[in-house]
Image (cartoon, helix red, strand yellow):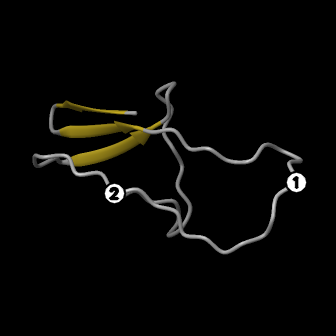
Amino acid sequence: MGASVQGGALTLTVEIRAPGAGAITTQALTSPWTLVRVPGVFQSVQLVDGSGRPVQLGGAGGQTR
């Protein structure tokens, strides 16, 4: 959805879509991902939703790299 830089920090605004509570879904193993290339060198990278709230990612303790 967008990218901005302020003081060496890169902020990526993302939209994550998931089925709603109680939705009927199939069970399948997946590994969805998106690759984004942003030119520059940054001290930190932050993922936020459209409202500016930090996005929590699963995996290794929810850490963002």
Task: Check the picture and name the quadrant holding the N terminus.
Answer: top left
Element at label 2 = loop
Residue behind mark 1: 24
- Number of numbered discs overlaid on the protein picture: 2
Residue 54 placement (x, y as % from top left) = 48, 39
What crowding class fits label 1: few (fewer than 14 Cα within 10 Å), some (14-19), or many (20 or more)?
A: few
Position of 41 with respect to 45 (left or right) is: left
Residue behind mark 2: 35
Q: Disc 2 or 1, which lies upstream in sequence?
A: 1
Element at label 1 = loop
Amino acid bearing label 2: Leu
Residue drawn 87% across the image and 54% down it: 24
Furthest-bottom residue in this view: 29
Residue 8 placement (x, y as % from top left) = 15, 38
Amino acid bearing label 1: Ile
Residue drawn 25% across the image and 40% down it: 10
